[in-house]
């Protein structure tokens, strides 16, 4: 990768796992289809300039809307880069990982592919992905912490398409109707969060709660751990969070339930399974909840209220801030592509061309390139504009990003959901839940 400043530092970077067939296929892979980056097998013509007559394949997942927009982006790239053809290869999220694992195992790895943070280490450690710092991709307008988010063992295997943040969503109207003041998110503690949730539930009356439970996503635990100078995972993939912190996290959920700040276990699990539209915020039945920032639009639309974003509690309570910018997804390049220069040119285009951003807006997260991000602010829907402003406010507070999750991390949210449910139903104490979580996650990520 190229940058106008010094070389980037080498510090760091939904609930689905590879099926047995996909995992076996990935494990069996021995490389891709041809030479690696820098090989002499590029099929450029002798006279047409770099890339003339070359076809590369780009794989991604998503909705029909994303597929249509991505095809428009491909068409634009081909128009600006005569001689390079981009072959689209897409599917929905559910089938993407099985398909990718199968094609990799068969020696037919896509030249450019989309990766997700829970799975990128699986592919990187099997020599499927190229070191992007050996290729000509401009990262000068992408913050270092975001570039580092795609590093596995110090090597840049993915570049973030865009970023989200795990944040507190708040309904000011619920607070106003109950006569409760919205807390100051620059100073509130985890205890403040529990207390104000209980206060809001009591003041709002039957059928309205202070908050939705926070314990079903490991991102919340990761933030608490980071606030206390730990990480959910260490750089080497081992667990970096101690039992005391995990127990504290599960205790927060129990405290919320006990003071009436959140519903009982049965209702909480039912609400959790209903997604944003069926959440407490989405149904005007709660004042707060933790969600990824890109879900603000769906929550606002479902509720019909003007929801706001706030920092999670505890950002000034412990050793440091814990919030981080999560890569929405990554662009990666095959280590065995026959066309490394053309593949790098395409990734550079996806990340750095303002015309791409104008088409894509925030579909792959708020753009990583800060200049490109600035260029689309006037085109964003109201909710996305709020997200952009919130993320800008956070930039000076984000210390770094957590290490890339290790192999097996795709199983962790399932573990978190099950154990948190046991706590809320009274089948486990927070201390027992912490022991179980640490044991099961260590087993899942040591495979």
Image: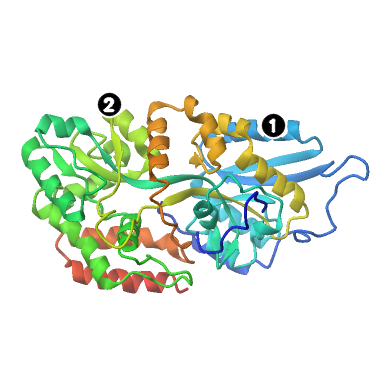
Residue located farthest toward the right when viewing the structure as drawn: 47
Residue 341 pos. (x, y %): 76, 50
Residue placed most toward the observer, 219 or 308: 308
Q: Residue at x 20, y 53 (%)?
A: 189
Above or below for 160 versus 419: above
Residue placed most toward the observer, 84 or 147: 147
* Label 2, residues with CA under 10 Å away: few <14, some 14-19, many ≥20: few
Above or below for 92 versus 42: above
Identify the secondary structure beneath mark 2: loop
Residue 258 pos. (x, y %): 9, 55
Q: Which mark is residue 182?
A: none
* Label 1, residues with CA under 10 Å away: few <14, some 14-19, many ≥20: some
Horizontal side of residue 172 vs 145, given as left or right? left
Residue placed most toward the observer, 353 or 92: 353
Q: Which residue is mark 2?
A: 304
Badge 1 or badge 2: first in the primary sequence: 1
Q: Residue at x 48, y 25 (%)?
A: 378
Residue placed most toward the observer, 136 or 433: 136
Identify the secondary structure beneath mark 1: helix
- The answer, for residue 427, to whether it is visible in the render is yes
- The answer, for residue 64, to whether it is visible in the render is no
Q: Which residue is mark 1?
A: 75
Q: Residue at x 71, y 51 (%)?
A: 136
Above or below for 433 versus 387: below
Query: For residue 429, which quarter of the picture?
Result: bottom left
Horizontal side of residue 32 vs 300, given as left or right? right
Q: Please say if the residues under marks 1 and 2 sit with CB atoms less than 8 Å apart.
A: no
Horizontal side of residue 36 vs 239, given as left or right? right
Residue 37 pos. (x, y %): 75, 59
Spatial CA distance of label 1 from label 2 is 37 Å
Horizontal side of residue 306 vs 292, given as left or right? left
Residue 381 pos. (x, y %): 42, 26
């Amino acid at each position: 990768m190229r940058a106008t400043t010094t070389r980037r530092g080498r510090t760091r970077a939904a609930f689905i796992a590879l099926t047995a067939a996909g995992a076996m296929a990935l494990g069996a892979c021995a490389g891709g289809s041809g030479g690696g980056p820098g090989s002499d097998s590029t099929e450029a013509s002798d006279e047409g300039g770099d890339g003339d007559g070359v076809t590369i394949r780009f794989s991604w997942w998503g909705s029909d809307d994303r597929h249509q927009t991505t095809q428009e982006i491909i068409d634009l790239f081909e128009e600006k880069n005569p001689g390079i053809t981009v072959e689209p290869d897409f599917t929905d999220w559910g089938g993407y990982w099985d398909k990718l694992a199968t094609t990799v195992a068969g020696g037919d790895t896509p030249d450019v592919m989309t990766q997700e943070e829970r799975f990128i280490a699986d592919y990187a450690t099997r020599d499927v992905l190229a070191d992007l710092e050996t290729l000509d991709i401009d990262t000068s307008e992408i913050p270092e912490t975001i570039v580092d988010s795609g590093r596995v063992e110090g090597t840049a295997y993915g570049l973030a398409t865009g970023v989200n943040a795990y944040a507190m969503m708040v309904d000011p109207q619920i607070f106003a109707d109950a006569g409760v003041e919205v807390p100051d998110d620059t100073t509130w503690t985890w205890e403040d969060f529990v207390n104000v949730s209980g206060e809001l539930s009591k003041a709002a009356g039957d059928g309205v709660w202070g908050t939705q439970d926070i314990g079903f996503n490991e991102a919340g635990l990761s933030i608490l751990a980071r606030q206390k100078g730990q990480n959910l995972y260490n750089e080497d993939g081992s667990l970096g969070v101690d039992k005391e912190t995990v127990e504290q996290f599960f205790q927060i959920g129990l405290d919320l339930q006990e003071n009436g700040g959140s519903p009982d276990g049965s209702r909480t699990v039912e609400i959790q399974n209903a997604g944003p539209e069926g959440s407490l915020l989405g149904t005007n039945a709660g004042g707060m909840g933790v969600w990824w920032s890109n879900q603000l639009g769906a929550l606002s639309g479902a509720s019909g209220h003007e929801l706001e974003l706030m920092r999670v509690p505890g950002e000034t309570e412990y050793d440091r801030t814990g919030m981080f910018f999560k890569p929405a997804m990554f662009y990666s390049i095959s280590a065995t592509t026959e066309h490394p220069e053309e593949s790098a040119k395409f990734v550079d285009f996806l990340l750095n061309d303002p015309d791409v951003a104008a088409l894509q807006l925030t579909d792959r997260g708020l753009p990583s390139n800060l200049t490109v991000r600035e260029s689309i602010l006037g085109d964003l829907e109201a909710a996305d504009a709020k997200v952009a402003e919130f993320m800008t406010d956070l930039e000076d507070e984000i210390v770094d990003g957590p290490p890339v999750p290790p192999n097996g991390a795709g199983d962790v949210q399932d573990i978190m959901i099950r154990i948190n449910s046991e706590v809320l139903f009274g089948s486990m104490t927070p201390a027992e839940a912490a022991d179980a979580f640490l044991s099961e996650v260590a087993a899942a990520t040591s495979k």
